[in-house]
Image (spheres, grey):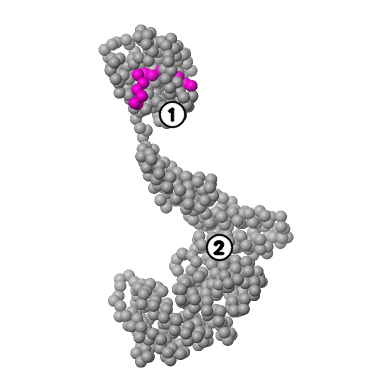
Amino acid sequence: MLKAKYPLQAPHPKALSFSAGDRFLPLHSPNKEKEWWLVLSKDAEVGYIPMNYVLYLPATTADITGFLQRGSDRLVSSSLSADQQAVQRRRLVQLAQRYRARDTAGDQLYRLEEPAARPVSSLSLFPDDESNTTEHVQTNGDDREATPVPDSEPQPQPQPEPEPERPLPAAFGRSLVDLVRQHTSASHQACQATVQALMGALKQAAPSVQPVVDQVLSQLSSADRDAAELLSSPDGRRLRVILEEMTSCADDQQQRSWQLHCDEPAIIEYLQELSTILTNADPCVSRRALESDQMSGVLALARLYQMEPRWLIRQPLTQALGLACGLHRDCISLLLSSVLPSELARDMQSSVTDDIRLSHSALLLSMILCMGEKLPHCHMEMLGAGFVSFLLETLERPPPEVSDDTADLLLTVLLALNLQYGSPTENQLLAALRQRDCARVFTEKVMLLFNREEDPVRVFDHEPAPAHSVVKLMVDLFSEPAGTRLFYTNDVRVLVDIVVRNLADLSPGDPRRHEYLRLCGRLLASEGYSEHGHRSADILLCLRRIATEEEMDGDETQPRDRQLATTTLALHGEMLEAL
């Protein structure tokens, strides 16, 4: 007989479930080369068990017949009808009689066919009669034929048929990523890479699981996810809870007016958790949570900033709002039309000696202005000429508390504000510069950015991309004498070198080339260029090449470049040829 060493929950329909210590009667001679054996359980069920889960147990004929008798007694509690129970008892009696006749425990009696689609609760695999020629075995009502086999003949072991492949739930792969993230607090990207690596290793180590692994990997690479699935993820549910709590805080105007401080730790904890999730969660989940209820949660954060004077709450608020701007383009438009830009400008002017507060407010304001989208008229007073003059003055004569990094952020705000102005007549930055005799720090920082071809305003990848803020500023500055006078002759020479380099390197269709062509025309028209004529031959060559380029299909910018180059040649061609 056989005895179970460990418990097992049946892994497929033809296997038996059992507990440790359960005994079985093999229905053929056990073969160690086979992984699964066909047995009779203590409840008179027939099915397969794995070889490595059992051990041999010496048994006499009396032990076996007693095992069969106990199985017959348990048929009373089975689901079989009275007639079926009677038939099974007769078969158990027949099997016990054969063991007594042979009087040898464990001898093979029959070569039996595989069991039915699931373990049967009867001995329908056993013959009904004592015939030595042909034995008929009935399985689930079907008659099958089994042939007696001599004791000395080795018998092949029947193998269980593989369970038919079942498709995994559609979100199973992503639920694995969520599970890893919940237990490690790592970023979604790191968790997904971990699951993919584990699936790849499992696929190599166990080729039999390749279909399942391929399904998981396919789910992880698929971007097809509906809104309900995104919001039902752990991060999605938590984001909605936090945003609802922040909405309740913003709506509690009475509490805000009383300025109670008992809620401060809870609000700060919520905002810090919000920033952590927006940083580490799946961006698709974060974007969908921010979109919910027409972005009412994002608006609530902006209102909370307006009503909350406490910097301990405003600081995590700026971090969360900045992350929201980076995740969703519409958050920028929404915040631009909210009270936030004016509140940030007011906060910057009232905290000029608080470096951390000034830098946080400047960074968030530059993010809101980074796309060049027009400010509503209600903000023009707060972010008008007075605010621009404040930024320039702080940049040129910063208080001792203001760090260099914060000064760079103030310049970024100026560059972002300059995207708001279309013509020189309405440009508040140019108007403020006209009132100054010198702007040395301002021009040095702008020249450094221009030489490096960096655009500090372009912090996000949202489309459509605005104009290059530094190049646009240069075009605006050289549109009138007041801006030109801010630069030394050597600065202008450096500018010409950079313009020539980009006109030579940038290919047709690159939108930056048009901006450099505009700047080239302004430099040629500026005061003093005709006196030094720096790189005039190279400029003439670049303009002629662009003006005579062959037209490329589907390129909308190239005709504009050709037209601008032709116009510049018409205006300044003779001067360039004479220099």
Residue placed at 69% from the left, 60% from the top? Answer: 256
Q: Nearer the viewer, residue 494 or 117?
A: 494
- Which sits earlier in the primary sequence, circle 2 or circle 1? 1
Which of the 4 image quadrants contains residue 345? bottom right
Q: Is 515 above or below relative to 323?
A: below
Secondary structure state at the residue bearing disc 1: loop
Q: Is residue 335 left or right of residue 30?
A: right
Q: Which residue is mark 2?
A: 322
Q: Is residue 142 visible?
A: no
Which of the 4 image quadrants contains residue 316? bottom right
Q: Examine the structure image and report whether residue 30 is included in the region drawn in magenta.
A: yes
Q: Which residue type does callout 1 highlight?
A: Ala
Secondary structure state at the residue bearing disc 2: helix
Picture coordinates of residue 466 (x, y %)? Answer: 46, 71
Picture coordinates of residue 371 (x, y %)? Answer: 49, 69
Q: Which residues are magenta?
A: 21-34
In the picture, the quarter occupied by the N terminus is top left
Picture coordinates of residue 465 (x, y %)? Answer: 45, 69
Q: Which mark is residue 10?
A: 1
Q: Which residue type does callout 2 highlight?
A: Gly
Q: Which mark is residue 270?
A: none
Q: Is 348 above or below relative to 93?
A: below
Residue placed at 64% from the left, 75% from the top? Answer: 399
Q: Is residue 507 visible?
A: yes
Q: Examine the structure image and report whether residue 377 is included in the region drawn in magenta.
A: no
Q: Nearer the viewer, residue 137 or 414?
A: 414
Q: Is 113 above or below relative to 483?
A: above
Q: Is 205 above or below relative to 83?
A: below
- Which residue is most to the top? 101
Residue placed at 37% from the left, 88% from the top? Answer: 576
Q: Tell me the CA gap for discs 2 and 1.
A: 53 Å
Crowd rating for badge 1 (residues with CA inside 10 Å; few <14, some 14–19, many 20+): some
